[in-house]
Amino acid sequence: MNADAAQYSFDKLHYFFRKADYARWHRQESKRHILRSQLGFGDITPSRPKACVGCVHYHGVTYGYNRETRTTLICGYHPYGWESEGDCPDWQD
C-alpha cells in the first residue's frame, strides 16, 4: 500500500468520525432547544375559559420561549378568550 492510499483511507475515516460527531452534537442541541422552549410550561395549570368549554374553535396552545413573552392563544376569533358576560357568539359544538 503506498502513501497516497494510506492518506486517502485516513481522510475517509476522519470524515466518518467527524460526521458521527456532528450528528451527535446536532441531536444534543435539538434536545436542549426543546427543553429550553418547554422550560416553565409544567408550572402552569391548564385552564379553559368557561365560554370555551366544548367549542370546536378552542386552541389553547401557549406560545413563547420564556415566561415574559409567553402567551396563550385561546382561539382564532378571540385570541385572549371571550371577555364579555354570556355566551360567545362564535361558539360551535
Image (spheres, grey):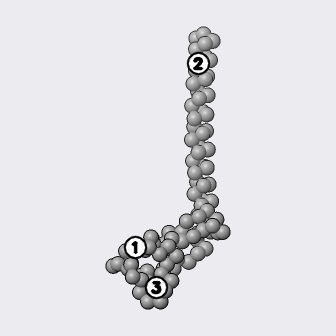
**In front of the other: 87 or 38:** 87
Residue positioned 62% across, 54% down in the render: 32
Helix, strand or loop status at disc 3: helix
Label 3 packing within 10 angstroms: few (<14), some (14-19), many (20+):
few
Q: Residue furthest left?
A: 93
Residue positioned 61% across, 62% down in the render: 65
Q: Which mark is residue 57?
A: 1
Task: From the top left corner, tell me how far across and down residue 63 is, in percent.
Answer: 55, 65
Label 1 packing within 10 angstroms: few (<14), some (14-19), many (20+):
some
Residue 31 lies in quadrant: bottom right
**In front of the other: 90 or 17:** 90
Label 2 packing within 10 angstroms: few (<14), some (14-19), many (20+):
few
Which numbered disc, 1 or 2, marks the residue closer to the eye? 1
| N-terminal-most mark, 3 or 2 | 2
The Cα atoms of the two marked residues, 3 and 1, are separated by 14 Å
Q: Is residue 70 visible?
A: yes
Q: Which mark is residue 8?
A: 2
Q: Which mark is residue 50?
A: 3
Residue 4 lies in quadrant: top right
| N-terminal-most mark, 3 or 1 | 3
